[in-house]
Image (tube, coloured by chain):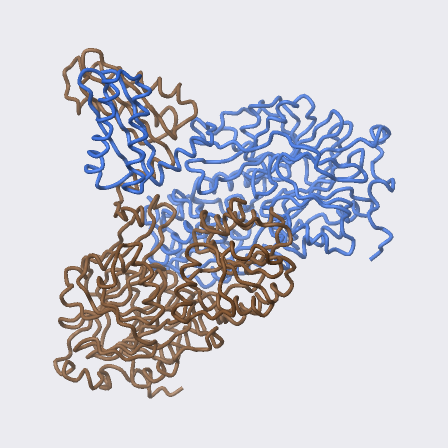
Chain colours: A blue, B brown
Amino acid sequence: MNRTRKHPAGAKGSAGRSTDKEAAQSAPKALRIIPLGGMGEIGKNMFAVEYEDEILLIDGGLAFPDADMLGVDILVPKIDYVVENAARVKGWVLTHGHEDHIGGIPYMLKLLPKIPMYGAKLTLGLLRGKFEEFKLKESDADLREISTDERIKISKYFTVDFFRMTHSIPDNSGLIIHTPLGRVVHSGDFKLDYNPADGKTSHLHKLAQAGQEGVLALISDSTNAERPGYTPSERDVMNGFEQLVKDAKGRVIVTTFASHIHRLQNFIRVAERYDRRVIVEGRSMVKNTRIAQELGYLETKHPLASPDDLAELADDKILFLCTGSQGQPMAALSRLAAGTHKKISLKPGDTVILSSNPIPGNEEAVGRVINQLYARGVNVFYPPTYRVHASGHASQEELKLILDLTRPKFFIPWHGEVRHQLNHQKLAAGMATPPLKSVIAENGDILELTRNDLKKVGQVDAGVLYIDAVGKSSEEITEPIIRDRQTLSSEGVVVIMALAGRNPSVEVITRGVSQNHRELNSEIEKIALENLKRGVREKRTLSDIRDDIFYPVRRYLRKTTGRNPLIVPTVIEG
Amino acid sequence: MNRTRKHPAGAKGSAGRSTDKEAAQSAPKALRIIPLGGMGEIGKNMFAVEYEDEILLIDGGLAFPDADMLGVDILVPKIDYVVENAARVKGWVLTHGHEDHIGGIPYMLKLLPKIPMYGAKLTLGLLRGKFEEFKLKESDADLREISTDERIKISKYFTVDFFRMTHSIPDNSGLIIHTPLGRVVHSGDFKLDYNPADGKTSHLHKLAQAGQEGVLALISDSTNAERPGYTPSERDVMNGFEQLVKDAKGRVIVTTFASHIHRLQNFIRVAERYDRRVIVEGRSMVKNTRIAQELGYLETKHPLASPDDLAELADDKILFLCTGSQGQPMAALSRLAAGTHKKISLKPGDTVILSSNPIPGNEEAVGRVINQLYARGVNVFYPPTYRVHASGHASQEELKLILDLTRPKFFIPWHGEVRHQLNHQKLAAGMATPPLKSVIAENGDILELTRNDLKKVGQVDAGVLYIDAVGKSSEEITEPIIRDRQTLSSEGVVVIMALAGRNPSVEVITRGVSQNHRELNSEIEKIALENLKRGVREKRTLSDIRDDIFYPVRRYLRKTTGRNPLIVPTVIEG
């Protein structure tokens, strides 16, 4: 290893490209990198990169809620900072079409003026696929298709070299961002698959060249930074899958992520090899395969079918691709497992393959589906016992390769919870040529990058919007509402209606509290009526009487029954 | 392998022991094995074993609720069948002191007459430890201490040979139940640890002898039936732990299951080897170590301390044992991670070791704690990267050994979800001398066992009680209440108070529904008032008016806002 090539970026002079010379002359001005999502979490990825009066946006993802965010459908980054500085935004580049990179964009488009948005064909196709649900028109956005290999001059200060990286979706890119201060490399989501379904491997050459010429900072995917070794290839998954299909006597039902077009392509190839027709089931699976086919990302000998088409086929001539790999209760596989699917019934002899791992938080749901499948007498196969899934993210040896090829002066571990970021940082520190400095960023941090330093200099107002009732009101909800729901969920609700006036009376309704509700209600009624009568007698205000009722009832419930339900008293003039 | 020794049990004559001769003469009568919990699940283990007019009970555990059983604290088996047949119950044997084997007993004692209950010293000690919380007295139970090696004649038909099996708690036994029809072997929970902390290995000799003499049926632990190979020894865990303690410069904080006395013993030994004083923190850890010490299951050079005692000690002289291995929000480790512990603050240089894996459903909570620990700059170690935990349950090779030693005629895979039971069944079917038949049982199944057959012949009314507010009202709650809570949790509640009479009026309160509640409320109010007025005009009954309000409001909410909250309308005469 040539130690004299150490950190050629930045101060040593080879930083800017010729296109950046003009801007570079007024250096040293700082570049600002502001993660608006995707730091300290896996989900809702988004960056703003800023130099002088220009902002470049990267991605705009969504995240899924934790179990205690009750009733919340999705989370999207709070982009107040971008909205306030919208006039300075010169371009928006998309690395790939996964929900955690583009799923937030429909919400954001409504808040922002039209910004030139650059993405590869499939990425834009999947984004357009969301427009209808959100009542957006093509003209609401300025979509510009690029190849995964293109150089785009975004603005005076920013030029972006896209470079292909293999991942669990086609048309996935990393970015070399040429700035007046030097190159910032953004790995994109990636694993290094030497045998991807389409034969198109990662453009390591471009990364190597950037490393040779000097990389000021590397932003890299930390998802699997705790995992030693290499992530297996999609080829390995196909081989594991083929073995099972070869041995299957009856129907084969397989589930995986609906956007995992490469894997679906491999599964379809195996189906064709064993003379099985492919039936696609489940809304997102139907939608994604349709988009992928229309755009040329999925080749099939026969048209993909629906369950209605192929009723006459023998069991060993059928392969289902279906949704439900995360145990989502309404998805095709969950319905099959529960015996509530309208068109298909599982039977002994069927083979079900889960080509996926549960995302943290979904273990219970997936476990339930697996048990139901076993109970139906079908043959069930899933990882780790069977090699029918591989992560889309790089393990430690791959991460080290990227660190070695780019040899960044500064390092920003991204796309991970704190545990992943810190372990990635540790990996980087252990390299033969470690970065001079690395920073564990949080969402909203303003990271200031000069040729000589990378540091946090402040915070923008970043955060998260909780979105409820997606597709209907798609309304933002707030933490007080979630807190109410948390109380309601574990303790139920006590409604007390008090009628003030000449004949004071009280009615009590409890829901979700206790099954001895008659006894409980009559006790609450007694306490409430007593306090209501005294309040009326003493001519207290309705709002005071409300408190007179609330506190004694709460005390009674806590002390006597150990319960702490939501108490909703109302006092009205009768 | 001597194939001529195949299935010596049952019809071939060596079935009963001399003590059973009298009963055996009236054979072939059937033995009934009725699992009341622990089948198709990991939790709330309990069996009733029945012959003629005698019943033998085994264990009485609790289970923890799934995430969707909102507000439920614990689950216990429904024992109506046992209560109805209480007069026939001759004895109750306990295999060990884990919650899923004894945690339900305090509830059951209140429903049953005194039954001779046999358990080893620590098992009874842990059971007694619950009495106070449940306001039970020693005289409420008939506890009889046995060794893990004892033979107990329970009644005319039942004699039980306890035999020690290694597991994640001391004083753990399997059972050889001698019946008029032959031997039924119950493995107990087990792994085969050749280096347990107390040096007392499993009594495989007794199992081998039973196999030699003939085993009619085997009931065996299926928890890890999907896991190939062997489960590591506690010795391996201790070695992994010691390596980390040796390298630690600051304080060491370790969490594991509070009942895992063997592991705690090993950790204390390591602490003493490195001259660290042991501080115990967290209610259940303090309680269990106290009981274990009093009964002689935990040896320490110095008394175990509390955080107050040792304020003056240097950081590298301290080792904390604390609760919170499952990310329980109120436990010591979670408070330390969140920075809300009253007495101890973590600091960079501290070492935190999680000697545990998350139980399914707890992954998110444990993940959150781990991230918080990283964010505090402490060194965090957990499996699988570090060998600081091993399961207490046998993997496939150990399960096969038990199957081979006992060579049961009939096999009942137990202590597992369906997936584990079926994989255990598959393992058994693959043995050189497979069982003649095996049955996948569910809770409540009546399994009838003769010398020649094992089959399901019916069902008793078994099921589950949901217990809420443990330690306060400890009240049973029912599914309708849980369903109300599920609606409340994701959708909130709309309360509509309608005042009928001369001046009809409506008041609407929403909680947990939407943040635009003013707008929403006024729309609901409008709909409700309109229908109330019409109802009053048309002199409809209050209950009819209630429906007149309920349905249009529900329709409005569903259609216009996509929401489906719990709607609670009340109409009162003003």
From the image, which quarter does the C terminus of chain A lie in?
top left
**Does A476 appear above or below A211?**
above
Instruction: Give coordinates of residue B510: x percent, y percent.
Output: 35, 26
Q: Is residue B213 left or right of residue B311?
A: left
- Tally of marks: 0
Q: Is residue A572 left or right of residue A122?
A: left
Which residue is at the front of the view, A86 or B361? B361
Residue B478, quarter of picture: top left
Q: Is residue B573 left or right of residue A39?
A: left
Q: Is residue A383 visible?
A: no
Instruction: Give coordinates of residue B267: x percent, y percent.
Output: 52, 66
Instruction: Give coordinates of residue A200: x percent, y percent.
Output: 66, 49
Which residue is at the front of the view, A540 or A61? A540
**Does B452 appear above or below B336?**
below
From the image, which quarter does the N terminus of chain A lie in?
bottom right
**Does B510 appear above or below B115?**
above
Instruction: Give coordinates of residue B131: x percent, y percent.
Output: 29, 58
Q: Is residue B81 visible?
A: yes
Q: Is residue A58 left or right of residue A463?
A: right
Residue reaching furthest top? B502
Residue A32, quarter of picture: top right
Residue B316, quarter of picture: bottom right
Which residue is at the front of the view, B30 or B356? B356
Which residue is at the front of the view, B178 or A559? A559
